[in-house]
Amino acid sequence: MSIVLAIPLGLWSGYRKNSWVDNAISSLSYIGMSIPSFWLGMVLVIVFTAKLHLLPSSGMNTVGVNTPWDTFLHMIMPCITLSLGNLATFIRYIRSSTIGELGEEYVLTAQAKGTKGSKILFHHVLKNTLLPIITLIGMNLATLVCGSFIVESVFGWPGIGTFAMEAIGKQDYPIIMAYVMLSGFILVIGNFAADMLYAFADPRIKRGIDSSNGR
C-alpha cells in the first residue's frame, strides 16, 4: 500500500515543486511521519468502529465467521496504520530524488525533443528514483514482519510481534532466540532482494555485474 501510493504522489510532488500540489502532499507526509501508530490505530477504531460501525475493531476473524472477506475487513485498519508512516517516508525520498533527477541532462534532452512530462516521469525518472526506496524496503522488511507488536496490540491481531512480547514477559528464552534469528534472517533476505532489484531498476548496475562476471 505504501509503495503503490508513494510512487505517484512522490513523483507528482517533485515534478510540481513548490506548487500547491507539492505543498499539500508534503504537508500530508509530514503529518504522517509525526503521527504515532498506536494513536492512529485508536482513532481509526473510534471513527470506523465505534462511530460509523463499518469495520471490526480487533482480531483476525469474527467469531463463527471464517471467510476471506471477513479477514479482509479485519485487515483494513491495521494495514492503514502500518503503511502510513512508511508512506510518508517514501514520499519524501521519492520527491527528493525526482527533483534531483529532473535537473539531469537526459531529462533536459527528452524535454528538448518534445517528450511529454508524464512519459519523462514514468519512463525515465521513475527507475532512478526507486533506488533509495528499494534500500528502505529491504531494511524495513524485518520491522514490518516482526516489529509491529504495537499495532498488533491495538487491534488484537495475533501476530509474531505480540507472540514475541509475550515470550519476553514470560522469559521464554527459546522463543526469544527464535524471534531474534527470524528478524535477522528476514533482514538479510530483504537486503539480498534489494541488491537483486537494483539490477532491474538501473541497467548500469546490471551491465557492471555482467562485465565483472566476464572478467
Image: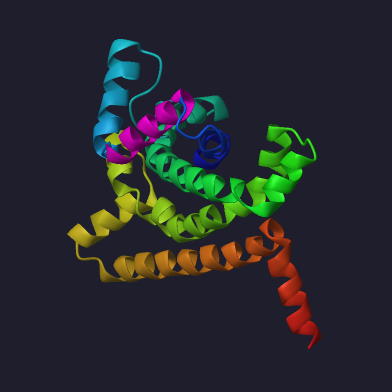
Q: Is residue 176 magenta?
A: no
Quadrant assignment, res 81? top left
Residue located 39% across and 40% down the image: 82
The majority secondary structure of the magenta stretch comes to helix
Residue located 60% across and 67% down the image: 195
List the single residue furthest toward the bottom. 215
The front one of 88 and 148 is 88
Q: Check the image and report above or below for 55 versus 211.
A: above
* Residue 61 appears in the rendering: no
Q: Check the image and report above or below for 146 versus 36.
A: below
* Residue 86 appears in the rendering: yes
Quadrant assignment, res 120? top right
**Residue 121 point in image, percent of width and height:** 66, 40
The magenta span reads 20-34
User: Looking at the figure, which quarter contains the C terminus?
Assistant: bottom right
Q: Check the image and report above or below for 61 versus 171.
A: above
The front one of 172 and 142 is 142
Q: Is residue 24 magenta?
A: yes
Q: Check the image and report above or below for 87 versus 191.
A: above
**Residue 165 point in image, percent of width and height:** 26, 55
The front one of 38 and 171 is 38
Residue located 24% across and 33% down the image: 39
Number of marks in picture: 0
Q: Is residue 47 left or right of residue 78?
A: left
Residue located 77% across and 79% down the image: 211
Q: Is residue 54 left or right of residue 106?
A: left
**Residue 206 point in image, percent of width and height:** 73, 68
**Residue 146 point in image, percent of width and height:** 39, 55
List the single residue furthest toward the top. 52
